[in-house]
Amino acid sequence: MGPVPPDKPVWGGIIRMDESVYDALANALPVPLLERRAICVPLVDCTGGDRKSIYVAVTTGGYACYVGQTQRPADIRGAAARRLAGHRQEPSKAAEWAGYWVLPLPKETRPDLVNECERTVASILGVPVRNRRWRPTQRDRYRET
């Protein structure tokens, strides 16, 4: 299967991000934000020195279409921007994503809490948490009999 043509959207999102949605997401997290950044950032811009964060990619219409997380070592900052740069190498994401919102987490946030934050945000926005290919063992277990 080849790249998705730009005229064939993969996911258009169902919730439009704005300051009130951002605040609702922040209030639902099990940890407080490092700081409030209720603004959509262009994909090419870095939001700051965040190391651990949850990010929400949005379409040109501002609709949430992807939720991800970052957990970077202490010497790597601007984690969300770095992670998004990797995503932009995928044609379907490059064609659909217009910006992102960042929910920066304290650097002391445990990995299990970062995972919980990602699941919480994805659940509220109605966005799948993971979009990964199945491993062969998973695929084999799910075959129809």
Image (cartoon, helix red, strand yellow):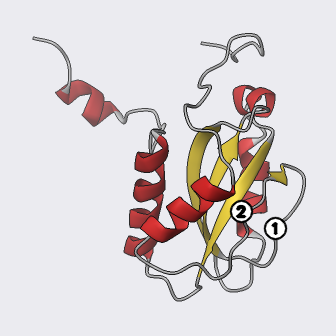
Mark 2, residue position: 80
Q: Secondary structure at mark 1?
A: loop
Quadrant assignment, res 8 = top right
- Which of the two labelled residues, at mark 1 and mark 2, occupies the earlier sequence position? 1
Q: Are marks 1 and 2 in contact (CB under 8 Å)?
A: yes
Q: Nearer the viewer, mark 1 or mark 2?
A: 1
Secondary structure of residue under mark 2? helix
Q: Is residue 121 left or right of residue 70?
A: left
Residue 1 or 12: which is nearer the viewer? Answer: 12
Q: Quadrant of residue 55?
A: bottom right
Q: According to the image, label 1 marks what residue?
A: 47
- At 64% from the left edge and 80% from the top edge, which residue is drawn? 73
Expressed as whole percent of the image width and height from the top left, the position of residue 135 reads 36, 36
Residue shown at 70%/56% (left/top)? Answer: 101
* For residue 111, above or below residue 60: below
Q: Where's residue 54, x and y in %?
A: 58, 62
Q: Quadrant of the C terminus?
A: top left
Q: Could you tell me how many numbered marks the image carries?
A: 2
- Residue type at mark 1? Thr
**Residue 62 placement, left or right of 133:** right
Q: x, y (%) of residue 50?
A: 71, 76
Q: Nearer the viewer, residue 11 or 141?
A: 11
Residue 22 lies, with reference to residue 62, above or below; the image says below
Residue ranking furthest to the left: 145
Outermost residue on the right side: it is 44
